[in-house]
Amino acid sequence: MTARTLDETLRRDGYTGLPLTTTGVGQLATRAKVNGIGAWFLVDTGASTTVIDRRSADRFGLRASGADEQAFGCVTTDAPGQVSSAHRAVVNRFELGGLVLEALSVHLVDLCHVNTALAKAGAGPIDGVLGGDLMVAHGAVIAYPSQTLHLKPGSVDSGGAVEHGGSA
């Protein structure tokens, strides 16, 4: 199956496609909107949860809630083997192409080490990481030949987020 055929098949099955960009360190990234504000997110199939950089939270109007908790699956410090504490926050409106989520729960973490590595490679900063929680909930398919992330609105339980159609 060619990339074009795969993309067309997924589109017919109700998936929305998001163009991917390869960063200076070889990671995949995509555009999103957080509460109506443009953002860059890494696509990380190994991250268990979707996170937003604490430094970007104010720009998006996000407020931390609850006590510190461990953001398992997201190592957010330079110290080997340590996992940073995180706060939960709720994104009122999170847009990824045609997938629109309301009341999406995310973790706020320090992504300074990621942005430092990207800057050293000549790449721009990211605002967050799309994790497995969101990708599993929406049946993510990464088509590497076409550099496209496909997500299906309403694919499976979205962790309490309310969805509807739209565009970023």
Image (cartoon, rainbow, N blue to C red):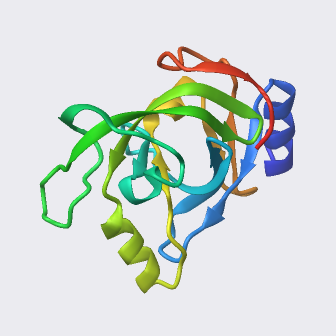
Residue 28, located in which quarter of the rendered image?
bottom right
Q: State which quarter of the image contains the N terminus.
A: top right
Q: Is residue 25 above or below residue 59?
A: below
In this picture, residue 86 sits left or right of residue 14: left
Residue at the spot 13% in from the left edge and 54% down from the top edge:
82
Residue at the spot 77% in from the left edge and 35% down from the top edge:
98
Where is residue 59? Give x, y as percent. 52, 55
Name the residue nearer the viewer: 128 or 12: 128
Residue at the spot 19% in from the left edge and 50% down from the top edge:
84
Residue 10, located in which quarter of the rendered image?
top right
Q: State which quarter of the image contains the C terminus.
A: top right
Where is residue 93? Give x, y as percent. 62, 33
Where is residue 37? Give x, y as percent. 65, 51
Marks counted in the figure total 0
Q: Is residue 132 above or below residue 12?
A: below
Where is residue 105? Give x, y as percent. 44, 29
In this picture, residue 9 sits left or right of residue 42: right
In this picture, residue 60 sits left or right of residue 165: left
Residue at the spot 35% in from the left edge and 60% down from the top edge:
111
